[in-house]
Amino acid sequence: MHGSVERVSRRGFFLGQFGARPEAAPGWYSVEGLSAGPDDVFWDGWADETGLFVVGDHGAINHFDGEDWVRQPCPAPVPIHALWGTDRANLWAVGWMGLILHHDGEIWSQMRGCVVDAGGKYASVEENTPLFAICGGADGQAWAVGDRGMVLHFDGADWTVENASTHAHLRAVIRLDDGRVMAAGGDGTVLIRDVEGTWHALDCPVGSNFTAAMALPDGRVLLAGGRYFIQANGFRGDLVMWDGETFEKLFTDTEFSRFRALGRTGKGLVALGDAGQIHLLRDDHIDRLQSGTGHDLLGLVDLPLGDVMAVGDYGSLLVGGSAALSCFAPAIRPGEEPANWSAMQSGTDRQLWGIWHDPEQDMLFACGEEGTVLAHDRGKWEALPPAGALGIHDLARAPDGGLLAAGQLGEIHHFDGTAWRKHFDLFMDITLLSMWSDGRGQIFAVGDEGLVLHWSGVDWERMPSGTKSALYGVWGMDAEHLLAVGDFGQVMRWNGKRWDEFNAGTEHFLFDVWGRSLSDVFVVGLSGTIGHFDGSRWHITPARARNDLLALTGTETDVVAVGAAGAAARFDGHRWHMDPTGTTAGLRAIAVDGAGRYFAAGDGGTILFRDAK
């Protein structure tokens, strides 16, 4: 102005490059420019006035210099869980297999961990104990903690193991203003290291699995974490204050999801965690902020000018400023989140294990306990005559246009529109769990103990599957290209002549499989495991959801998976998003009709409907 040169501060320039905040989203907004997808998990970050580091699974170290994101080389491809440093020329990272990295301002060097044996695999040695948190001071000393009570101390020259006298898994470590160090972890474990270097256990009455700790200016310490409750079928969050002598559980009348990280802002303390929860603590009250995501948030990064960034599952990177810290979510009790699904009257309270869309008639059928079979006609569910007295797990079109129902004791029943008759009997205590038909007379059924049956027009024949593991789901592109999934990550592939193993790269049970083509296949399973085959390799999303995913299906534009405790997730072609269902009933099956509408069935006769979106 007036002929002078306008100077833009580096701080302001750096902050302005995360992408424009959407006008309709005054709160938290997603970072642009970093290529991240459903396989990415970000655990932590570190920032100064010249740039930002974000670390995560697969040895991810992403650096933002104010203009571009660049993935920096990592010496070991394992998850990196935490960052700390006095400056970018003295930055430390810790992670899986005991990994410790140091950044000198130019490159990352491996200082410890990830020891391999003669076979090239990670060795079962103490040095490979996973590490999850790190802290330090201006004097350059640092402490890192991890599984089985592992505590490491860096004295400015070397890392050495310290005896903390515990085998609890440790997930948080902080340095207090008086020079002491606090570590916290599983089952309410809280430890203090005195200035002489000796660790002592504190008597914490709250049996939480602590994941974060923060020292407050008045000498108190805030601890955060969560516990699993069987009756709730999930984790509940805990916030605990230590005043130097005693522990007090905060906000006992409020239910939270599990907390993962803590941070300090000009408006108060921030606690974030599972299911996209972000809470603002001020004095003696707490408010939930509108995060705009249902993904688990795992870390909080202080940014220049007082803004913060939340990082987490499915490549989540959210920036929040003063507007985000004032954008409060409406008070909603657990289980009352706005749902994208609507409940339907099924007319039964039996468990429903299968739901199937008949493309020929554009009709839906559901099946379950005690031979239950339902038909959806003109907007209502009506009961068909029972298909025997045993449980029915799946349905398919019969060769003559009727309906097939398969289930317990290896029985398959046929419905001709009026009555059921037994179509096949294995005469063995083996349950058939899933069927697939090409609509032209070729039918496959799979089940317990690696059972595979094939109908080619004359009779049911048992096929050698090559496995004794249970097979829970089967899907095919055609009668010569099928996949079946089961126990311990088992994937079996049929090529028209034989079944062969098809390693998906996970040991978690897989419960269903579905695809659009042979190069676009999805699987789901235990603890929210999601996998995708792109025609060349499998990409497995780490098991980090709170509930098992039991079934999935999709259209040309999206994929939806459902599971235990009313869990649902939707893939929009780029990322997976949690999809509130409004129920805690287990959802065991899903189908989509010709109009792209989804129907899910499950426990207690539950049937939900989701309109095409």
Image (cartoon, rainbow, N blue to C red):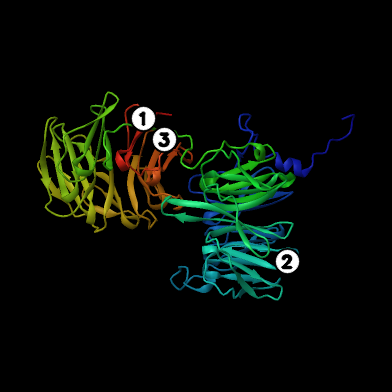
Which residue was labeled with disc 2?
A: 140
Of mark 3 and mark 2, the one earlier in the sequence is 2
Q: Secondary structure at mark 2?
A: loop
Q: Is residue 308 left or right of residue 57?
A: right
Front in this rendered view, residue 204 or 65: 204
| Residue lying at 46% horizontally and 55% vertically, measured from the top left | 228
* Res. 110 in view: no
| Residue lying at 51% horizontally and 63% vertically, measured from the top left | 187
Q: In which quadrant will I find the N terminus?
A: top right
Q: Mark 3 Cα within 10 Å, few/some/many (few <14, many 20+)? A: some
Q: Specify the label residue 558 is tagged with.
A: 3
Does the CB distance between marks 1 and 2 fall below 8 Å? no
Which residue was labeled with disc 1?
A: 597
Front in this rendered view, residue 534 or 249: 249
- The amino acid marked with disc number 2 is Gly
Q: Secondary structure at mark 1?
A: loop
